[in-house]
Image: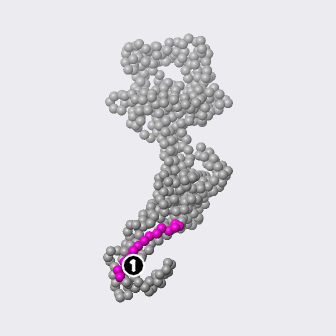
Amino acid sequence: MSSIIYLAATMMSLALGAKDQVAAKVTDVCKEKKYLQQLAGRLTAEISKQEGDLSSLETDLRLWKLAAVKQDKCQWRLYTALFFKATSLHLEQAQKVKNTRTKIGHALQLTERHVGAINAIQELARTKVTERASKHGTNVATKINIALERTTGGAQLCKPLGEHENIDDDKPTPDFNFLDTIKLTATSMMHKLMPDETLTLTGDSGCSPGQTNAPFATAINGCSNASGHAIAATATAKAKIDHGTTVKVFNQEKQMQECATQPSEPNGETAFLTKLGKAICEALITGAETVETLSDANGNKLSGDDLIPNAVRNCGAAFSNIDKPSDSASNKEFVNYLKTRYSDTTKVFKQTFGTNAGTTHVALRPADKTDNKPINQTTTPEQQAAVLSNSEGERIKNEVESEKENTVTASAVDFKTTEEKCEDKPHGECKEEDGCEFKVGECKVKEGVKAEEKKEERCAGKGEKECKAPGCKLEDEMCKCFSIMVKEHFAMMVSAFMSLVAF
């Protein structure tokens, strides 16, 4: 996805020869500061978006893992595949976000340092030199010491730009994607920005009038004390305070793809500005990358993914004979099955596997009592662990009870219904003589064949003692059907979930 962004930026640059026009208008430290603050805002927004997208992906994978607990075998494998896809994607995208966080963090640190230097020189410029009230004196007959101090009342370096003011009113937002160069002021040059300061000695007579640009010795020549000597101080802002150094950012032929070649041996403040330019470039490039999520998923996209078809194939016996699950040419029926189950529109996918799944209630045992909560309210690691561990505990308990109580082997008594004979059969084993047919990617009861007694009906109504037949179990004081196959699938998933997701 990021390569698409880079390609688009390159094509725009080549087509328009684009450069950031706002950067070209940075002619004083006030504008310099504003530009860097806007840049910092852009970088902060980009890392926030990437982290938000990554968090959304993590929410999805937890949702699908917990939702799988409550699904039948058909839905279970669909949710399981989504969980593994989201887990794989999360691991990959987390590394991308980590890299972006490092690059942007470095750029922000250097930017804040430079803005801090500008703030300092702006504050210093608001002061001026003036005469001290005391501490003046003479130590020889030919010298007088004039004591000075700094006070408020200096001149502004330049016009500060507020939050809603712009460097260029015609173009409020800089084109950071086309930032080839920018002029930044080295801290070693900032003293040159200070206002011109003048001390006026009053109470003299005999001075030559009309001198404006003379050395001190010439200006004071002929002056003598008349009465009431005093010193007055003034500070005047310089008309031009552009002492910026041109700093390279992007390679102008590969904007948003490649940084400019920097000087081989920069030194002093030039070295810092070079480092800042490179950091800005790298931060803009990584910040523009897109974190891939499953927010726009649907059956059409998921059926063409490598992981999803393979996971669904491996989780269902009906598809175990498929060699290349993502090959639509040789497995058209299976691919169509995925498209149908996951829906061909993103809207329906989100409703089914997002909203509806989130409102599904799951059992959790955080303490001495078992509780039921919607998945979207099961948000803490402790709650999620309570759901998975409780379900695993139920599976183990039912398995032990089944092994203890069922003394009649499956070969001696076959309670399989027509539906059970067809369920999860691969294409080659889906036999017509069993009343089955392979349709829409699944082995189902053939149309027209009368379904035999269902296990649910066989178990329903039995008392505690009678509810010991194979395939039955007592749950919530009711005798219900018990399928160990689904529970075995779930046990495998609990183990996988615990190993892949760090709570």
> Would residue 41 be seen by someone viewing this image from the given angle?
yes
Q: Nearer the viewer, residue 469 or 38?
A: 38
Q: Which residue is drawn at 53% across and 25% down?
A: 74
Q: In which quarter of the image is the N terminus?
A: top right
Q: Nearer the viewer, residue 206 or 21?
A: 206
Q: Give the range drawn in magenta.
A: 227-241
In x, y percent, where is residue 353?
Answer: 51, 30
Q: Quadrant of the C terminus?
A: top left
> Which quadrant would residue 404 be assigned to in this image?
top left
233 is higher (above) or lower (below) than 88: below
Q: Which residue is drawn at 49% across and 78% down?
A: 212
User: In the rendered image, which residue does mark 1 sit on?
Assistant: 202
In x, y percent, where is residue 277?
Answer: 55, 59
In x, y percent, where is residue 107?
Answer: 50, 55
Q: Residue at x 42, y 63 (%)?
A: 123
150 is higher (above) or lower (below) than 182: below
Amino acid on which the number 1 mark rests in the picture: Thr
Q: Which residue is drawn at 41% across and 84% down?
A: 205
